[in-house]
Structures are given as structure tokens and as C-alpha cells.
Amino acid sequence: MTTAVLNAASDSEGYHAPGPASFDLPPVFSIGDFGVTKPMLLLVLSVPLIVGFFWAASKNKAVVPGKLQFAGEYVYGFVRNGVARDSIGSHDFMKFVPLLFSLFTFILVNNYFGLIPFLQFPSFSRFSFVLPLAALVWLVFNGVGVAKHGFLGYLKHVTVPGGISGPILVLIIPLEFLSTVLVRPVTLALRLFANLFAGHLLLILFATGAAYLILDSGNPWYIPVGALSFVLGIAVSFLELLVLFLQAYVFTLLTAMYIGGALADEH
Amino acid sequence: MIGYGLAAIGPGVGIGLIFAAYINGVARQPEAQSRLQTIAILGFALAEALAIIGIALAFVL
């Protein structure tokens, strides 16, 4: 798909359209054969950033919070009340707040690396970085379901929706099993990956396109098109501001919903 | 590429309908917003899953 576009672009002009290859960054440094790339460093960098921020926010605890403490409490309250309590239920949501909170802040900070100058790479636009998160969520929501209902009970809980009986079950059971066990983790991982990948690709496309059309094309008629591309790049950046937050939110919310669904007494 | 563009129409319409219904619901009953929001995001995620499967297939094929 993209190779055709690439060839067409490079044959007619000197412009190389960005593609999936733009995400294969060369290693920054290597330890033996193991190359450490920029997304890995960003992933590691995000942890001290998050820990540092919340450490600073909770260092001088006061009844009347300061600016920093308020910001920290706001994020925490958002995840606890807006995500965990609303979708798991007020009975046993507190157990899962640490997991959901870490997931949310971790994904959020790594997403916003895509818009910070010089860093400018959302780590989760590499699929292999998203997979462990989805696997963790899959283990957790199935684990709590099995712990609550027992293995067979959980299987029945997952595959048989309440209020359905008779021959339709032959159709429903495999479908529900497939959707819970297979489709859920796959879409969870793919959603985060594909949104960040597509968004970042769009940004690269508009930015490099504008630079090429304005500076390197040598044809004055291309300059207005390049300017349009530049403006669109800025517009997409603002869209990305929203999308990056929304993806972190959706990932956490769906995790909470899956856990809530596994814990629920009936469908 | 064109195929993926066409495939994105369906989820696009679906997401539009979901949020239209959500806005209607909140306008009629603002106190139900937090409940409706969860349902709307879930529906949005399910509709979006189709578009995502599309983009994954576009890269695989």
C-alpha cells in the first residue's frame, strides 16, 4: 500500500513520503547487539517524570491545597471517581485504583511525548510497547473474574448473557467467548497503537510536506500548497492534543469496564 | 487505501450517531451525564474497533 505511494513520490520528485519506516528509528546507543532506541528511553523517562510530579505534589500536604497539590489531586480524583468508581461500582473499586491510575498517567505522559519539542515521539506508536499493557489488562480482568466466580463460573458468566436461553445459546456462547477472550485485548492494544501511529504519521506528513513544498521543490506554484500543509499541520497538532488525552482515557476506562464486567454479579 | 477510506465511512457514521444520541440524552437529562458518558465512550470504542481492524488489515494486506 505505502510502497506504491513511496515509489510514486520518489520517482517524480525528490520527496520521500513518510511511511511505517519513519517509525523505525536508529538506535541511540547500543549495549552489545542490543540497540537502545528513542522510544525505549522515552518510556523509561516517563517514570521519573510521573513519580517526580506526584512526589512534588504530595510533599507539602495541606488541607487547602497549593497549585501543584491541586493538580495532583485533580488527576487522582479524575481517575478514582470519574473512571474507577463509575465503572467498577462503589463496593470494590478502591483495589483497582492504583492499577488504573498508573495506566492512565503512564499512557498520558507517553502520549504527550509526541507533541513535546525534541522528544516528539509517542512511545505507544510502536505496537510492541502496547502489547504488554494489553496483556496485563487481559490478565487482570480475567484473573479477578476467575477469583470471584471460580473458573467454570467465570466461563459461564462471560459466555452466557443473562435472560437468554434455548437454541440461540449455540450461537451466543462462541461469539461472547471470542469477543471477551480474543477481541477485547486485541482491540485494546490496536486502538492505542493505531491512533497514535496514524496521528503521528499525519503530523510527519504535513510537516515534511510543508518543508519540501516551500523550501526544496523549486516551483513557486507549490508554495501556497506548502503553506496550506503547514497550517493543516498546526490544526492536526491541536486535534492530537485531544486525541492523545482521549486514548489514555479510553484505555483506562475500558480496563475499568472490563474489570467491572468481570466482577458484576450478572450481565 | 481507497478501500480503507470506504471502510472508515461506517464507523464514522456510527460514532456520529452515538455522540448525537449522547448529546441528546445529556440535554434532556443533565444529571445522567456521568452514566451516559461511560456508555457513550464504550459505544464509541466498539464502533472505532471496526475502523482499527480496517487500518490493521490495510497494513497487513
Image (cartoon, rainbow, N blue to C red):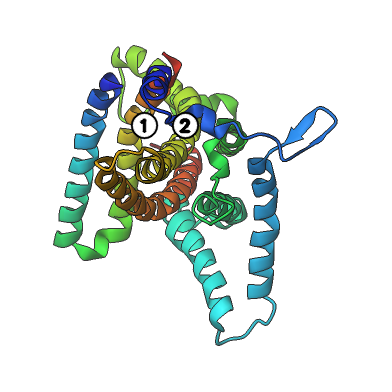
Judged from the image, the secondary structure of the residue bearing numbered disc 2 is helix
Judging by the rendered image, the residue that carries numbered circle 2 is: A190
User: Residue B3: where, in percent of width, then height?
Assistant: 27, 19
**Whole-percent x, y for residue A217 in the image:** 36, 37
Residue closest to the eye, A165 or A173: A173
Number of numbered discs on residues? 2
Read off the chain for label 2.
A
Q: Is residue A201 visible?
A: yes
Residue A149 visible in rendering: no
Q: Quadrant of the N terminus of chain B?
A: top left
The reply to whether discs 1 and 2 touch (Cβ–Cβ < 8 Å) is: yes
Chain that bears disc 1: B
Tell which residue pokes out farthest to the right in this image: A32
* Vertical placement of residue B5 versus A208, above or below: above
Q: Residue at 22% across / 64% down in the picture?
A: B30
Identity of the residue drawn at 35% across and 19% down: A172
Circle 1 residue: B49
